[in-house]
């Protein structure tokens, strides 16, 4: 039975890659056919549309197997000089690296930030705009997770416990005084890593922990994501979603949740929005109004670039974070060690939610403040961003204009061990003000 399942998994994995490759080829063919010089003698708009469809299709399907580059712009100093940003791994592991964004000819900044990137289908470069916005004011590090299809089976497993231990190791490497910002999926595991360090190695626990749009308590408010997790049994998920990497990649034989399968789910959640975006782009190409770096291409070059995650990580996330709700119940364990969130006492904690977040709805992330019952109320802050979707609270307009200044203020207030001063900006609420839940119906993700 195992042999049959493995063979079937490889066939399914390679079938998806074949479909992707075929669509890329069809796009390239249509682009070349529609651009054939002889057709200039017959100036029919059909040929422009064929060529435009081909350019959009070829680019879209080719991006799905390419890891994006960071492409960070230089940082401009107060004296007007440009400072080049170098991407440097400082701690390398099989499943992910700790990466430092070193700004040339600049002294280390007092704010040291570890950005914990989600492992949910996209590369860490999804946080490119977040990194760019923080670099002028912070020393920034990021968790750069690897594509599971490129990791040999000999490297072993990687599940939620391994992920948590990676965060513990990264924080120990960075040393005391680090501020950790966890975005989306890793928020509950970042909270668990903080609790482990608080109990076992308090000197290396983060000075502040900012949780942005993460499912600390998925049962606090239902979304399509939580409904799917509860509706599907673990056996169904294993049978329908888990596949075996084909022979084309270094990770041949590894069981994964394929990035292409994840991308199909992402697009299905907002199918009309994506369909309209691609139709508009095809007509823009036909009119000659599109460009290589326009808004559509910048977004979809990143959004369509997906990575596989290990089967054990995906399944353990669904089982332990969503179905059993182990973080919210304070029942999570790592390597047989009980993770007691109440052990967190000296870490300042901030939660950020979007009122229109349809992936991690308001109420799911702010639950962390109640769980951290040993943290004094004056060291806990919550912020609910009006009219913001999931993407907007860490990379969109809401992040740039409202949330980023609040996060920097929060970090500054806890740079020392002294009690935090009064906040310099409005919009956030102390934890003892009660939870905020929007009355209006959640909007869709702003993509």
Image: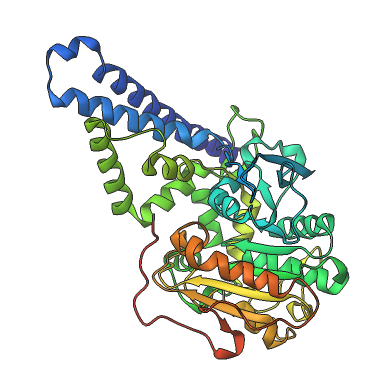
Q: Is residue 177 visible?
A: yes
* 177 sits left or right of 393 in the view: right
For the point 66% across and 47% down, which residue is it? Answer: 145
* 99 sits left or right of 11 in the view: right
Residue 42 is situated, as x and y percent measured from the top left of the image, at 12, 15
Residue 437 is situated, as x and y percent measured from the top left of the image, at 45, 82
* 103 sits left or right of 444 in the view: right
For the point 51% across and 49% down, which residue is it? Answer: 241
Q: What residue occupies the far top of the structure in this picture?
A: 38
* 262 sits left or right of 139 in the view: left
Residue 85 is situated, as x and y percent measured from the top left of the image, at 66, 41
* Number of marks in picture: 0
Q: Is residue 123 visible?
A: no
Instruction: State which quarter of the image contains the N terminus.
Output: top right
Is residue 25 shown above or below 439? above
Quadrant in the picture for residue 235: bottom right
């Amino acid at each position: 039975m195992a042999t049959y399942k493995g063979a079937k998994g490889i066939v399914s994995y390679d079938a998806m890659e074949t479909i992707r490759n075929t669509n890329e080829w069809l796009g390239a063919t249509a682009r070349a056919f529609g651009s054939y010089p002889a057709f200039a003698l017959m100036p029919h708009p059909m040929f422009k549309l064929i060529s435009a469809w081909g350019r959009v299709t070829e680019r879209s399907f080719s991006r799905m197997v390419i890891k994006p580059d960071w492409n960070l712009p230089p940082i401009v100093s107060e004296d007007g000089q440009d400072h080049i940003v170098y991407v440097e791994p400082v701690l390398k592991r099989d499943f992910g690296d700790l990466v430092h964004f070193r700004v040339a000819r600049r002294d280390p900044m007092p704010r040291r930030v570890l950005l914990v990137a989600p492992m949910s289908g996209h590369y860490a470069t999804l946080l490119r705009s977040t990194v760019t916005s923080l670099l002028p004011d912070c020393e920034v590090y990021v968790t750069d997770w690897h594509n599971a299809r490129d990791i040999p089976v000999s490297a072993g497993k990687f599940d939620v416990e391994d992920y948590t231990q990676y965060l513990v190791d990264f924080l120990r490497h960075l040393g005391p005084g680090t501020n950790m910002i966890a975005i989306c999926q890793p928020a509950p595991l970042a909270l668990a890593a903080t609790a482990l360090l608080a109990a076992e190695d308090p000197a290396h626990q983060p000075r502040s922990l900012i949780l942005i749009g993460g499912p600390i308590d998925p049962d606090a408010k239902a979304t399509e994501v939580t409904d799917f997790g509860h509706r599907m049994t673990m056996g169904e998920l294993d049978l329908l979603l888990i596949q075996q990497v084909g022979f084309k990649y270094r990770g041949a034989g590894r069981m994964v949740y394929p990035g292409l399968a994840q991308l199909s789910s992402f697009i299905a959640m907002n199918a009309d929005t994506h369909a309209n975006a691609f139709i508009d782009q095809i007509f823009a190409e036909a009119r000659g109004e599109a460009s290589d770096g326009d808004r559509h291409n910048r977004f979809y070059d990143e959004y369509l670039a997906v990575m596989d995650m290990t089967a054990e990580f995906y399944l353990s996330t669904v089982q332990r974070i969503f179905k059993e709700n182990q973080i919210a119940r304070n029942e999570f364990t790592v390597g047989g060690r009980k993770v007691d969130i109440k052990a967190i006492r000296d870490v300042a904690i901030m939660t950020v939610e979007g009122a229109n977040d349809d992936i991690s709805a308001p109420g799911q992330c702010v639950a962390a403040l109640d769980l951290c019952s040993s943290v004094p109320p004056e060291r806990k802050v919550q912020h609910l961003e009006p009219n913001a979707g999931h993407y907007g609270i860490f990379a969109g307009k809401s992040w740039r204009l409202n949330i980023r200044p609040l996060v920097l203020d929060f970090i500054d207030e806890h740079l020392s061990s002294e009690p935090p001063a009064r906040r310099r900006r409005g919009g956030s609420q102390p934890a003892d003000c009660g939870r905020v839940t929007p009355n209006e119906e959640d909007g869709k993700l702003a993509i």
